Each structure stands twice: as C-alpha cells, then as structure tokens.
Image: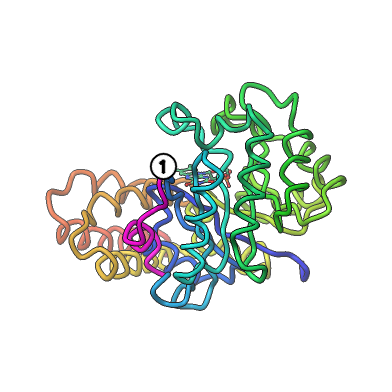
Amino acid sequence: MNALKLVLAPMDGVLDAPLRHVLTKINFYDYCESEFVRITDITVPAGVLLKKVPELSSGGRTDSGTPVYVQLLGQYPEVMASSAALACRMGAAGIDLNFGCPAKQVNKSNGGAALLKTPDLIAEICRAVRDSVPENIPVTAKMRLGYDSADHFLEIAEKIYSSGVDALCVHGRTKADGYLPDTVRWDLIGEIRKLCPVPVIANGDIFDRISAEKCIFVTGCSMLMLARGALYLPNLANVIRNGEEPFSYEQMVETVHEFIAAFRRFSPEGNIFARMKQFLSYLREYYNELTANEIFKRVCRCSSEDEALALLDSTVAEVMKGEE
Ligand SMILES: Cc1cc2nc3c(=O)[nH]c(=O)nc-3n(C[C@H](O)[C@H](O)[C@H](O)COP(=O)(O)O)c2cc1C
C-alpha cells in the first residue's frame, strides 16, 4: 500500500489536541483535522481558533510534525472565507469545510449536513473560501451522500469539485443514516471518484486492514480517512499501511497513559476522568471483555482519578497473568 494516504478524521468532543498528539505520534498520518469550529455570522475570534486548535501556535502541526487542517462549519460564504483566511494567517496547514455534521443543533441553524439540501450554497462557500486562502494552502470539503436520501449525491459532489477545492472527502452515508452499521455505500463513493478531477478521500467503516483493502477496491480511492476505527485500535493506520501487528493489551494501556499525560499538558483544568472513560469506551470495541471493557466497567465505579489510574495497571497485570 505504498501510494496510500491516510487522514485522521475530525471528531468533535473526541479527537482533540491531546488525542491528535498521541495518535499522530504512534502512526504516520498524512494529515489530521481539528474538530469542527462553528462559524456564526461574524469572523471567528482568534482565541476560539487557538482554543480548538492549539497546534496553530506551533506551526499548524502536531509534535510529531503531522499537519493539522482546521475544519470550519458554517453557512455564510463571506464569513467562512474571512475565518478561513484568519486560520491560515495563524498557521493552519489546510482548511476543511464540513457539509456532513448530523447534529440537530447544528442542522437547525443550517450548518453541516443541512447544507446538503442546497448544493449551490455549498459551492458558493467552497469558492469563497478557496479564493480567500493562499494558493499553497489546501482547501478540502467533507460531505455525506445526502440529507434524507442519496438521490442527489453526484450533483452535490459535482458542485463541490467544480468550485476549486483541492480534495473531496466523502463519508458514504446520508445524514438520515446517522452512524448505523451496514449503511455505508462505498460503491457510491466510487461513482464520485470516477468523475471527480481532484482526489477523493473515502470514509466510513474502515476498522481493520481487510475493510481498508475492500474500501480501496470498491471505491478506487488511494486516500482513506479513519475516524472511530483509529480510536478502537490506536495503531490502526500503521496496521493498514505497513501490516504492523495490532497493539497488544500492554501497548493499549500505555497509550491511555500517554493520552492522560497529553491531556494534562493541553488542558490542565479539564476533566481527565471523563475523557479517560470516553477513550476506554472506544478501545473496548477492539479489545475483548477482559481488557478495555473490564477496565471501563471498573473505572466507571472509581471515585477518583488516582484510583482509576491504579486500576488501569492492575487490570492489565491481571489479564497478562491470565494469558500466561
Ligand atoms: C463522536 C463523533 C464526532 C464527530 N465529529 C465530526 C466533526 O467534528 N467533523 C466532521 O466532519 N465529522 C465528524 N464526525 C464524523 C467522522 O469524521 C466520520 O466521518 C464518521 O465517523 C465515519 O467514519 P468512521 O466510520 O471511520 O467512524 C464525527 C463522528 C463521531 C462518531
């Protein structure tokens, strides 16, 4: 998989700076994306951008040198353009535009996936942003296949790729599909790829090497975006790219410790306990009952961070002993 490019997805409330730091240190990602930054009817304040994307103060890259694209979500072309220009002046490595977020609150104010109902407005936003951003900084867009149905997926894609963006990421579901299993349509991503003059990034349900190979085969894409799978298995990108062994239980727990250290560095005041439980809830998808799931259940019963940290280590020791 030499020519393969892998992108670490935007995940609001999950893939923040500490997790981006940890996952881009473990894996080689071609670039990663920030959580979406909500753009209202005024240019986003610099402080908001810095809070969501602290990497802007270190050249728009994670510690391991992975470029961080800033994802913007909004409906007003001029304000999106001025906000994108500001993000670039502050050091963004790229700009991504969100046309896929299914959250009710966001859709109510005509943001994210709601824009899929007005492809002309999407095109206007893409064009305005592309025009306001220096040529050497990529502008990408991320779409779902439609709002209620996939009836207009080609029209939406065509509006986007004709507006000058440098790449188009397609999550192969409609807004109505949410994240339901077995709804992802890689075949339709392939339809877009055949017509699209810029790279298409395939996204949705890539959880292991086999699904990555199948997605590449069905879509014909050589760029993939990993979201939930990157959290289920912390070294998923390396497993896909190099055939690396999936992380052991011990490495998984070490990753949780690294996350905790990074979280303390980026958000000294933040609630580490809640974030640790959230990370474990993803990890238990890959690691079996006796590991992440068991740790998750036990951690949920803890009343302090120190107690939870001690539990992490003792549970893994127990698992290792059981395996001998
Ligand atoms: C908790 C959560 C938060 C997400 N936040 C964002 C976001 O901020 N911007 C975005 O474009 N997509 C967001 N997504 C969608 C993912 O980037 C991705 O498109 C989707 O999860 C499908 O990929 P997967 O099957 O690999 O998880 C989010 C998904 C989840 C589960």
| Residue 109, percent from left and from top | 44, 30
Towards the viewer: 257 or 38? 38
Indicate yes or no whether the magenta region holds residue 316.
no
Towards the viewer: 153 or 139? 139
185 relative position to 15: left or right? right
Towards the viewer: 225 or 182? 225
**Residue 260 quadrant:** bottom left
| Residue 302, percent from left and from top | 16, 49
Neighbour tally class for label 1: few under 14, some 14-19, many 20 plus, Cα within 10 Å = some
| Residue 21, percent from left and from top | 42, 69
Residue highlighted by disc 1 = 40
120 relative position to 110: left or right? right
Inspect the image, locate mark 1, and give the three-letter code of the amino acid beneath it.
Thr
* Above or below, 162 relative to 258: above
**Residue 15 quadrant:** bottom left
* Above or below, 66 relative to 305: below
Towards the viewer: 65 or 118? 118
Quadrant, the C terminus: bottom left
* Above or below, 276 relative to 300: below
230 relative position to 277: left or right? right
